[in-house]
Image (cartoon, coloured by chain):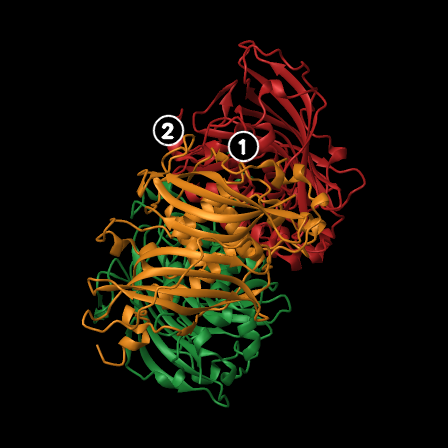
Chain colours: A orange, B red, C green
Amino acid sequence: MSDSIAPKTNPGNFFEDFRLGHEIRHATPRTVTTGDVALYNGLFGARFAVQASDAFAAKIGYPRSPLDDLLVFHMVFGKTVPDISLNAVANLGYADCRFLKPVYPGDTLNSVSEVIGLKENSNKKTGIVYVRSRGFNQNGEAVLDYVRWVMVRKRDEAAPAPGEKVPELPKSVEVAKLGLACPPIDAAAYDTVLAGSPRRFGDYKTGEKIDHVDGITVEEAEHMIATRLYQNTARIHFNQFAESKGRFGRRLIYGGHAISLARSLTFNGFGNAFHVAAINGGRHVAPLFAGLTVFAWSEVLERAELPDRKDVGALRLRTVATKDRPCADFPHRSGDDYDPAVILDLDYWVLMPR
Amino acid sequence: MSDSIAPKTNPGNFFEDFRLGHEIRHATPRTVTTGDVALYNGLFGARFAVQASDAFAAKIGYPRSPLDDLLVFHMVFGKTVPDISLNAVANLGYADCRFLKPVYPGDTLNSVSEVIGLKENSNKKTGIVYVRSRGFNQNGEAVLDYVRWVMVRKRDEAAPAPGEKVPELPKSVEVAKLGLACPPIDAAAYDTVLAGSPRRFGDYKTGEKIDHVDGITVEEAEHMIATRLYQNTARIHFNQFAESKGRFGRRLIYGGHAISLARSLTFNGFGNAFHVAAINGGRHVAPLFAGLTVFAWSEVLERAELPDRKDVGALRLRTVATKDRPCADFPHRSGDDYDPAVILDLDYWVLMPR
Amino acid sequence: MSDSIAPKTNPGNFFEDFRLGHEIRHATPRTVTTGDVALYNGLFGARFAVQASDAFAAKIGYPRSPLDDLLVFHMVFGKTVPDISLNAVANLGYADCRFLKPVYPGDTLNSVSEVIGLKENSNKKTGIVYVRSRGFNQNGEAVLDYVRWVMVRKRDEAAPAPGEKVPELPKSVEVAKLGLACPPIDAAAYDTVLAGSPRRFGDYKTGEKIDHVDGITVEEAEHMIATRLYQNTARIHFNQFAESKGRFGRRLIYGGHAISLARSLTFNGFGNAFHVAAINGGRHVAPLFAGLTVFAWSEVLERAELPDRKDVGALRLRTVATKDRPCADFPHRSGDDYDPAVILDLDYWVLMPR
């Protein structure tokens, strides 16, 4: 193998390659289309009326149906993988994730990340990288902003740590920062019969728990099609030959797939929670594999009116997803010990019409 | 579990919840796009030229390619599931199904059903619900109208029957009612070479049987993607965890999936039958599961000229689909005893250029 | 079975049905859409920026993102199957394949083939048919032109050979014929950071070999969805019931699926090779089945400047794909003996910005 070969394929960044303050412009820009929307619908069965019907969206004040928020998230996230997490051991968390502008079919998305924290682990083999990633549309307007941190391998254990800083992150996104991606809507024109649920913002209360009842089994073809659609290149999702010899013996499903499945399940209980305004934090508690069935339940952690807005209110939800375990009794955790069936513990803000 | 929880998820309607004359507006309105069309093509391999090519459609008189009729059917049908058949034991039949207006990418569909019949079963545990369901576009124009009847569980066996009426339904749709969804076409401009079959309306005769030769194996990912695309929420199609303990031990495939597969197979024999004008009746004789291969054959039951139309003629077809059984010898039934391989017995009208 | 039945389903052409010079117009014309593009992306994970982003494409001189070249190839190829290769024993080769014009979403493609060669095999049971197939858009402009040859069964072994001629075919497409489907681009406006690779035409040299590192496992649902999307009707890809009794015991994956997977893998190494200008030849060395993982490596066979063009240069590549076998040591062949893991040996021209 000649020396000129190695650098032409992307080896990804290792822990010592990152620098505090370093800004990374990611490939590949991507025009999102109604084709992507159809495939997303086929994979997750989304039923929120605002995203499903141009006519419904137009009636309440959108120019047309915006993209599902999580589809935007996955598209922006996918681009960061080749630069940030190709050598990741684990995706540790998300914080301060805010949707800033609606995205419509025809828009082109690209992503930029800034390294905002670094911390070598005591074993010197790995370190934690904190990045703030932002998605932009073709006009350079930010549509999404979030922090994630991942544990990344070092190429060379003897290499010095490239810096040390652990950023302070909000435990949840402030209410005043919610709603930028939701235009003023005409809540009276919002037809709850067509939307599939009679319950508006005022009908939920803090502490309420809802079992979403339904379960969705995942197939290998499905999660690979989804993950490729986002141009997410993390190898562990696609290569059974390599994974058959790996830790799990099989392909690991992209964590975002579980988030989208859980979001889809929440329709049965929060049918008018049409917009994910922010993700406060999320933990992929356990891996998900093809053949398993995902269930979910949610708890209303907080209710908030948005400053200067009478059209929509915000619910802060915890949604917990499980595998092969119905959620009628709300399986969660005691202390740090999660129920063994739990795969996802997500804390996020949704908007509902008032 | 607090009392406020149960009503927030959709338990579906039980037999005693229905009332004669009750009109139900269904969620979720849905803008259909070229993305949906692409996915439908990828799943079923449709090859009818009018639906495949804008240029072909425009040449004969359509503004552009209309949606595949069955895609419209599935989209309209899917919306009715959460209200009509979430507690169904069995989907018993269809009748008087008429396509009334072409649907184009960009149109938004919604569905409304009226309860037109109710009949409690003698066991008092279930009853039959007859509904007339209609699909509308964004302008409020009806695009599809059909009756189906389903056997629905009672929540409470002691509840009185909510009414009793068995509607009279036509055994087949009258010829005079066919063709509303087909604009006048220029039959001379219809290029049979491009369309893939030299045979026009005049080349078929009553009683003729055609084996469609090809077989298509179904995968779990495929039927779930399709059924979610239609926002059909019937649980039996998606939840392997629950179904593994159920009657079949596995996920049941949406009956409409078999109809679309059968329609796709009929291209090899009826390549110019570009429009399904009506469905007279259909019976899902046996369940279909992933891993099985679907075959089909058809018989021309009737030939009819449409009043005042010289451009197209109608063929009434019986299409019978089987699983893991080629159809060279036209497997069907003797009396009520179907060949054990038969899964579908469909009676419908197609239009062909004259 | 009545006599009138057989001719209504397509039995395909047998060797003795072909005539030298015969021109065949194929069904079904097909409008390609952003829906097809999304599905193609979901199936193959394409990441070339020109095809992914309308904004990127517009910046360098395209009106918008063109379709992936191989998606065009598959669409044009698929149409030829019912007429050319329904009774094929083997797809023997491709030559002189040139992309002539970019294809955009909304264009309608159709295909025409001319029989340019025939040669009966000595066993009199089969013969080789050479066809030049061309794809056209809705304006009648040729977008693709290629030759393929297939071994086709005879219906009747006693039938005389329909002619004998073996066409002369170029071993590779002349450099002067490359680039017609690539408009003049502004190479300075081509942003290599956004595109995901810093390397332009000048950074590659003849003889260089690159292992593309990644592997992609194929699922039954994926290859069937793709192959149906192209309206390719070859039975061996879809019918497990029949194939379970066949030579391999299972469905064979369309050879073009392996080509698209390999092309997708080459992004990691040739991230700016945004356009396949020509395919010089290709050999499906061994069959591919679901469950196997595809890897690939490439060698730069030749570098060429295009006459009168300073914007792009051409690399002639050999890309070799394998199944369940990483390619760090560039597995290929010694003489005619291929490494048993090799499934594809493809020789083609790509364009890169200078």
| Left-right relation of C8 to C270 | right
Element at label 1:
loop
Q: Is residue B199 above or below residue A178?
A: above
Task: Indicate the amino acid at tag 2.
Answer: Gly
> A321 or B171, which lies in front?
A321
- Residue C157 shows in this picture: yes
Tags 1 and 2 touching, CB below 8 Å: no
Element at label 2:
loop
Look at 58% across and 51% down and name the residue there: B37
Look at 46% across and 29% down and name the residue there: B287
| Left-right relation of C182 to B167 | left
Q: Residue furthest right?
A: B308
- Residue C161 shows in this picture: no
Task: Write down the residue under mark 1.
Answer: B9
Q: Upstream in the sequence, badge 1 or badge 2?
A: 1
Quadrant hosting residue B175: top right
> A173 or C174, which lies in front?
A173
Disc number lying in front (1 or 2):
1
> C1 or C61, which lies in front?
C61
Q: Which mark is residue C210?
A: none
Where residue B158 appears, x then y in whole percent? 56, 10
Task: Write down the residue under mark 2.
Answer: B249
> C235 or B240, which lies in front?
B240
Task: Indicate the amino acid at tag 1.
Answer: Thr
Where residue A114 appears, x then y in whole percent? 42, 70
Count of labels in the image: 2
Q: Residues within 10 Å of mark 2 (few under 14, many from 20)?
A: few
Marks 1/2: CA distance? 26 Å
Where residue C252 appears, x then y in whole percent? 35, 51
Q: What chain does mark 1 sit on?
A: B
Where residue B33 appears, x then y in whole percent? 61, 52
